Amino acid sequence: MDGVSFRRIAVVVSMAAVVMAPGSTAHANHSWGGYHWARTSNPFTVQLGDNVSSTWDAHLSTSSIDWSASIVLNTTIVPGSTSPKTCKATSGKVQVCNSTYGRTGWLGIASVWVSASHITQATVKLNDTYFKTAPYNTSAWRNMVMCQEIGHTFGLDHQDEDFDNANLGTCMDYTSDPASNQNPNTHDYDQLAVIYAHLDSSTSVAGTTAAALGDEAGNTPAAWGHLVSGAAGPGSAATYARRVGNGAVFTFVVWA
């Protein structure tokens, strides 16, 4: 597999970041394995495919604006190209979807495909089965989950995984009360600058070819592969990895 161990791939290939309802310590460095989009210049632009309903449009727009405040990357919202229910990946883009995915135990998942050290495509799923009911049917919860899942698709991990300590003021922080954790903070932008400090000789962004490593991540642990960190179930964070061809898919899970 291009000299990359499965353990490393487990941290990279299929990254599904799942946000669950209501711990660990804050991450001084919250890059997940150094995986990043290949690009030949900064700032570069990541396209976010809009496969969300009107209920989610404002939250997608907020996250796009927030992450574009980074000095190394911009985002732009483009028409989606997939059924929200299946939320299939598109090479070079991030497809963002919402649907009633069922009582899966997660609020949202970000699935990230990687090849060697480069992100090649990603999807974000937002589970309306939970967002249509208390306590998640709020703007604050929608903003935090949307922001966090999109952040994972750039190569960011969580800053903190303790639901019950003081909020850090970032959507990359686990919390039971997202009121002050709805947007990125300075540390998120600083980490992106570190991840994207170098340039590549080619690009994996905004491709138009068919997905080379598969295009569906699945909605359950059985589909996500091996549990490589954390634990399955409420009140914990979990990372799964599944080998796909010469790459992998990482799944970061936050349980409800």
Image: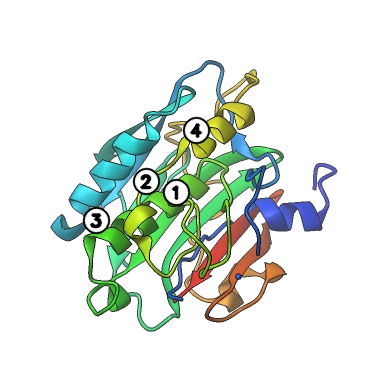
Marks 4 and 1 sit apart, C-alpha to C-alpha, by: 11 Å
Q: Which mark is residue 80?
A: none
Q: Position of residue 51 (x, y in %)?
A: 26, 53
- Mark 4 is surrounded, within 10 Å at the Cα level, by few (under 14), some (14 to 19) or many (20 or more) other residues, namely some
Marks 4 and 3 sit apart, C-alpha to C-alpha, by: 26 Å
Please state, as top left, top right, bottom left or bottom right, where the C terminus lies in the image: bottom left
Residue furthest to the left: 54
| Mark 2, residue position | 183
Question: Of helix, strand and loop, which one carries label 1?
Answer: loop
Q: Nearer the viewer, mark 1 or mark 3?
A: 1
Question: Of helix, strand and loop, which one carries label 4?
Answer: helix
> In the image, is 162 to the left or to the right of 24?
left
Are the two marked residues, 1 and 2, in contact with CB atoms closer than 8 angstroms?
yes
Q: Which residue is located at x 56 percent, y 45 percent?
A: 156
Marks 1 and 3 sit apart, C-alpha to C-alpha, by: 23 Å
> In the image, is 133 to the left or to the right of 193?
left
- The kind of residue on which mark 3 rests is Val
Q: Position of residue 226 (x, y in %)?
A: 70, 70
Marks 2 and 4 sit apart, C-alpha to C-alpha, by: 11 Å
Q: Earlier in the sequence, mark 1 or mark 2?
A: 1
